[in-house]
Amino acid sequence: MTEQQPIVRNLGLQDYNDSFQAMCDFTQNRCAETADELWIVEHPPVYTLGLNGKREHLLKPTAIPVITTDRGGQVTYHGPGQLVVYTLIDLTRHNMGVRSLVTLLETAMIDTLKQYGLLAYAKAEAPGTYINQKKIGSVGLRIRNGCSYHGLSLNNNMDLTPFTAINPCGFKNLEMTQLINHNVSINNDELAIPLVHSIYQQLS
């Protein structure tokens, strides 16, 4: 079977619950011939708590809603200025396991940041991407019937303050960073181009 390139949809600012339901519906209804898709989005301010997430990692109450979702991992924050890419990929078709997909997404973020002169790296014990011990990118996935949904988030130019009200991804005292803190000023649409390109290349 000839590999199809994923369909890319730039959906702009989207309510988290709407995106979550759309991902579930897409994954539930896809078949072996369904093309993979990458959804580029931003979300209004929201905390999301993973399937086995512990509420103790929510350190103090805020006005930001907390939504329980079915991805792996603990609690994280999404907000405007953060690039989110949802990866709706048939892992069976690509002969991939979940760890391989995590590595692929980490690599895509590392490759992208390198293009802007930033040296990022991954940690085997704590999925995501880091610069100088500060986290800049996160990965959270769910696999159903051999297909993935959810994906990655990369901090670009956002208000990082809401991260201080949680233990990001379940880690105490984990500091967050973003591209703008490293003197890289670009919009999410521009940032998405090399990120999606790297995902494309690795899936080919």
Image (cartoon, grey):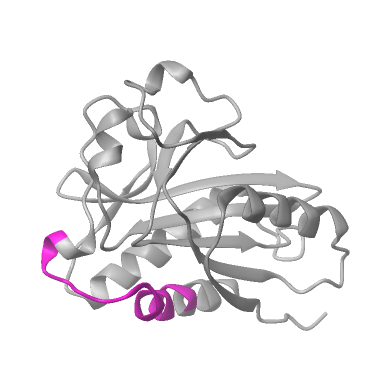
Q: Residue at x 59, y 52 (%)?
A: 150
Q: Is residue 191 magenta?
A: yes
Q: How many marks?
A: 0
Q: Nearer the viewer, residue 137 or 26?
A: 26
Name the quadrant of the C terminus: bottom right
Q: Is residue 160 left or right of residue 150?
A: left
- Part of the protein shown in magenta: 181-196
Q: Is residue 94 left or right of residue 166?
A: right
Q: Residue at x 55, y 33 (%)?
A: 50
Q: Is residue 141 above or below residue 101?
A: above
Q: Nearer the viewer, residue 101 or 56?
A: 56
Residue 20 placed where, x, y %? 65, 50
Can residue 49 be seen in this snapshot?
A: no
Q: Residue at x 70, y 58 (%)?
A: 91
Q: Is residue 78 magenta?
A: no
- The part of the image, by quadrant, that contains residue 198 is bottom left
Q: Is residue 13 above or below residue 96?
A: below
Q: Is residue 43 left or right of residue 58?
A: right
Residue extending furthest toward the left: 183
Name the quadrant of the N terminus: bottom right
Residue extending furthest toward the front: 63
Q: Residue at x 60, y 78 (%)?
A: 8
Q: Is residue 66 above or below residue 34?
A: above
Residue 34 placed where, x, y %? 82, 71
Can residue 87 be seen in this snapshot?
A: yes
Residue 176 placed where, x, y %? 23, 44
Q: Is residue 177 above or below residue 162?
A: below
Residue 160 placed where, x, y %? 25, 47
- The part of the image, by quadrant, that contains residue 88 is bottom right
Determine the main secondary structure of the stretch shown in magenta.
helix
Q: Nearer the viewer, residue 138 or 60?
A: 60
